[in-house]
Image (cartoon, grey):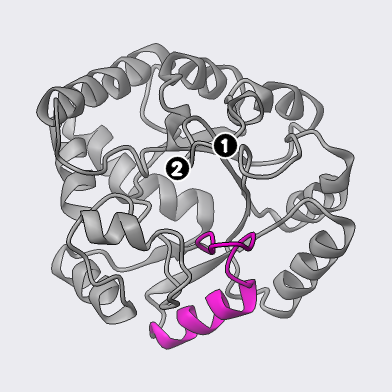
Amino acid sequence: MHLSEQEDDALIRFARTNGLRYTLDELLDTMKGYGIVRGLLLSPPLQGAPSLPNDKIITLCTRSGGMLAPVVTVEPTAKDVKTALQIAEENKKEVKAFKVRLGYVKASAESPVFSGLYDYAESEGLPVLFHTGDTAFSTGDLARSHPLTLDGLANKREGLTIIACHFGNPWFEDVAELIYKHPSVYTDISGLITGSKGYAEKYVEWLAKKISEAIYFAGSAEKIIFGTDYPVTKHSEALDLVRRLDVEEGDKEKILWRNAERVFGL
């Protein structure tokens, strides 16, 4: 999930589309309403700037009374990597993962600038989330955000827990192969739905079919994690997507919370 409570938050347009107030109180109330006890909070992109500073995410998580845990966003410069690692070290008990915004930054997953990040993440057992697939803005770089760009990294760093966010949408089959091939690669179902125009109902049916087929291919739902990408997708929509999956109820339970609890130590 994302949050900033700032006027220059670039995700405000998604909040308006979804009829959301996009505030900390709304987010926490929504989580309580659906019985969600913990969630991961990430920096949203800001207009004219890379993303919300990580220290503000730490503050929002502190205000959440333990319901939100921070994920540190890492930009592709030596200075930003060093700062991100300092924040993670200073908040070691709270930070649950790192995030690299593939497709939004001019760097690939295997860029040398991230070497120190991966070393630290491996040593501390912290997952690294990567944006994969479609980008929220037309200026995004799909060549860098394609999920198969993570294959080389996973080959070189078998001890690094990698999470391909957004199921690599629309490259679901490629992500299915990644999570089947690599023991340390996972994916999530966040940010797949926004708005209700056009073929919205058919699109959700298509999503449920693609995710279900990926589970069949991988042989289990052990590698798939629930998420919303709030305010991009509403909690109600993400939960409805899980309900539509043509898999066993036990697998839905894994997706909804068991996998996240295990992978992030929640």
Q: What amino acid is labelled 2 in the image?
A: Ala
- Image quadrant for the N terminus? bottom left
- Name which residue type carries label 1: Gly
Q: Residue at x 43, y 31 (%)?
A: 167
Q: Quadrant of residue 210?
A: top left
Stretch in magenta: 43-64
Inspect the magenta stretch and tell me whether residue 9 lies in it.
no
Q: Residue beneath label 2, please?
A: 136
Task: Name the residue located 36 percent from the left edge and 67 percent from the top edge.
Answer: 38
Magenta segment includes 57: yes
Tag 2's secondary structure?
Answer: loop
| Element on which disc 1 rests | loop
Q: Is residue 208 above or below residue 252?
A: above
The residue at the point 21 percent across, 65 percent down is 20
Residue 123, position in %: x, y? 79, 54
**In the image: residue 28, left or right of residue 149:** left
**Could you say which disc has been placed on residue 140 in the image?**
1
